[in-house]
Image (cartoon, rainbow, N blue to C red):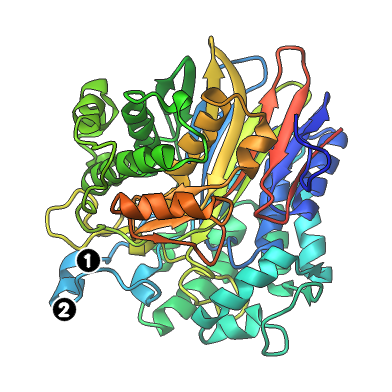
Amino acid sequence: MRDFHRPGRSATFAANGMCATSHPLAASVAVDVLKAGGNAVDAAIAGAVLLGICEPQMTGIGGDCFVLLKPAGSEKIVALNGSGRAPRDYSAAEMRSRGLATVPIQGIEAVTLPGAVNAFCKLSEDWGKLGLDAVLAPAIRYADEGVPVAPRVAFDWAVDAEALRGAARRFYLVDGQVPKAGQMFRAPGQAEVLRRVAREGRKGFYEGEVAEDMVASLRALGGTHTLEDFAGVTCDYAEPVSGEYKGVELVEHPPNGQGATAILLANILKHFDIAAMDPWGAARAHIEAEAAKLAYDARNRFLADADHVTRLGQMLSPETAAKLAALIDPARAMAAPAPLSEAVHKDTVYITVVDRDRMAVSLIYSVFWGFGAGLASDKFGINFQNRGAGFSLVEGHANEAAGGKRPMHTIIPGMLRQAGRVTMPFGVMGGAYQPNGHIRFLSNLVDFGMDIQAAMDAPRSFGALDGMKVERGYAPEVRARLAEMGHDVSVPDEPIGGSQAIFIGEDGVLVGGSDPRKDGCALGY
């Protein structure tokens, strides 16, 4: 139980349905959809699409999504890959011929096809109850009328706005300026796009005037995207991957997402007595950082489009984890792993919903970097993602850029299952941090017995990439000890990640948690 003398928030309890996400308007809309007779899929789509208006620097209809879904009356988990592919004429060789060693982070080369809208349409058709017209109505209204910019959103917007170029400055600045907290942000162009999707389904986005606007805008910027590329966008159901950590099954989305990295990290950490360590001491942070270095190095070598991954079994095997765990010195930091084969950033939204029939949805949705590629379509203001920056330009690499191929993705939804029962949909935003965030959250629950909210509130560190980031919640002496152990320690300007989760109790009670690092909340009824 938390100390009620101190600042903080309690977990949220409800019996009928619940949503946890990073913005209160989206959580409220999702619960309203549940109350109106919609199920968890309806509510998750409604909330997710609205997040693109509430947090446009993080996500939008020009981005991608991944979904884990537990149907009502079943403990089986279904994965849906809503990530887009590179356009047909995309070529690593062509980029190498121009002297590029990596895909430009925010160049036109980074713009892959948007997959999220197609996935939302597929989810609604296959699993929803209310239909797209009802589900998209709240986001359409807010896009037209506007939403007040929330404090964390304003903080991120000020950092990310420098990426905006051309038409994107017209659509994502207010009177030419970065909006401040409390200012209204409107997106009438996106409202019109959503009206067309509500009427026509995926055709309203991937064909006709909306697609023509996106293609003309991209080609004017030097892209190779075609109307045929957009019309051919699909999403795919897949079998999740999973691993066990101290009696809890961690279920992750398969490649091209990085979920297997979280499972490998969990398998490595099982070789250490984490529960015996101070949860906020240097020893735990050090072991976790060293394990993450090794797991992320494997990620960078092996993960890619599912059609090109050949060593997934090796990543998931206990034998691999045992060999890697043996490389960790409990008293000294190792050198950084091989250079990244893909870009890393942290702009993502996550939403989870559980309904009265205990259908559960874990959905993550992103444009990758802040405002994606920093580019938008000229007529409707659709912000293009820069997921192509997740490709490698190394010839022969599994993740080598190619036409029609999906890049390795950082966004991963998660679920936990115990004794065959799904107990928790959850997610931890934060780009590359996400696998580490999944394991830190799980370890807080399992190793230290924290409740769902305390497990989110607790301070975080991340030492796999670009030095050792340690939040201010750690004591100065811990940072000093980590530096003595060889870590390049710094306090990040932004907090590390942001999480949301809903625990499904055997007694029927739902318990929600929402990360204080974001503006959101868990709401139930």
Residue 16 vs 458, above or below: the answer is above
Image coords of residue 173 (percent x, y): 66, 82
Q: Quadrant of the C terminus?
A: top right
| Count of numbered labels shown in the rendering | 2
Quarter residue 194 falls in:
bottom right
Whichever of labels 2 and 1 marks the residue nearer the N terminus, that label is 1
Residue 324 vs 198, above or below: the answer is above
Quarter residue 225 falls in:
bottom left
Q: Residue at x 42, y 37 (%)?
A: 284
Label 2: element kind: loop
The 10 Å Cα crowd at callout 1, few under 14, some 14 to 19, many 20 or more, is some
Residue 91 is tagged as 1
Residue 160 vs 435, above or below: the answer is below
- Mark 2–mark 1 distance (CA, rounded to whole Å): 13 Å
User: Mark 1: which amino acid?
Assistant: Ser
- The answer to whether one can see residue 409 in this image is no
Image coords of residue 442 (percent x, y): 52, 30
Residue that mark 2 sits on? 99
User: Mark 2: which amino acid?
Assistant: Gly
Residue 155 is tagged as none
Q: Residue at x 71, y 18 (%)?
A: 505
